[in-house]
Image (tube, rainbow, N blue to C red):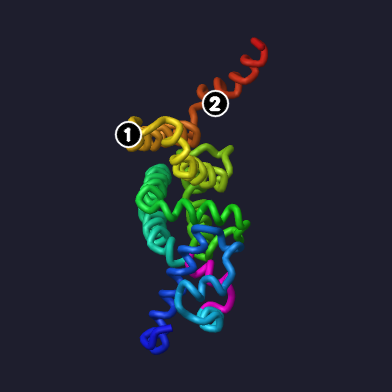
Amino acid sequence: MTTRRRRDPEATRAAILDAAEDLFLAHGPSEVPTSRIAKLAGVTKSLIHHHFGSKEELWNEIKQRHFEQYFKVQKEMLNSDEGPLELLHRSIMAYFRFLQQDERSVSFMSWRFVEGDEPCLAEENELFEVGIQRILEGQEQGLIRRDLNPLSIIKAFLAMVLQWFQTKKLLCDMLGEETDIEAMEEKYLQDILTIFFDGVRERSSTEAAASEAAPAAGGAEA
């Protein structure tokens, strides 16, 4: 351990966080012992426990540090005066660009699912609560379908966005180097926006009746 780190708690915390983030993203939090983090960071295990208490709290601190800027941007949008549909559009775009610009975020999200994380950080809970409220406002205004659960709407767009980035490498391998992945990525974004908003916008009574009749007609033909 360097003299500087012994005298600088913030430098020690940063070294631990950097080492833990690299190891957690490569192997998953449950597969990384504290001793390995300490070795990579150049500190003792006792210092990790001193600064973070436990490996679980260290993992939460890393998530907090990594997603803090995204939470801030999303919160500002949700607290703006924009209408519910405009906010949904901007939220999808913001999440897509966030994952697009930081591939490590995709690994973070994947490991969270594998590890069976607690539902959310405090900031995530707040975003979900405010997001649900804004969707409810849109439903009350007749802009968003009332038969859809607001939580389902949020989970749907998160899943549609994340799916692209989780399978992007596999898609590149399948299609080969000559494929314009960047163009395909932008087309995917436009497609999910179309699919999503065609599904959540409130429909006229004629459209709703036609939609409800379609499955029955298909079944009759079968």
Identify the residue shown where x is 42% and y is 60%.
Answer: 71
Q: Closest to the observer: 202 or 124?
A: 124
Residue 173: which quarter of the image?
top left
Q: Looking at the image, is 137 positioned above or below residue 27?
A: above
The residue to which callout 2 is attached is 208
Q: Residues within 10 Å of mark 1 (few under 14, many from 20)?
A: few
Give me the residue at 47% from left, 72% from top: 40
Residue 107 percent location from the top left of the image: 48, 53
Point out the image quarter for the C terminus.
top right
Residue type at mark 2? Ala
- Relative to 197, is 50 on the left or the right? right
Question: Magenta segment, which residues?
Answer: 52-63
The amino acid type of the residue labelled 1 equals: Ala
Q: Residue at left 42%, top 80%?
A: 12
3D distance between C-alphas at marks 1 and 2: 34 Å
| Residue 118, image quadrant | bottom right
Front tag of 1 and 2: 1
Relative image position of residue 52 (x, y in whole percent): 53, 77
Q: On residue 100, which mark appears?
A: none
* First in residue order: circle 1 vs circle 2: 1
The residue tagged with tag 1: helix, strand or loop? helix
- Say which element carries label 2: helix
Taking the magenta stretch, the answer to whether it contains residue 187 is no
Q: Which residue is mark 1?
A: 183
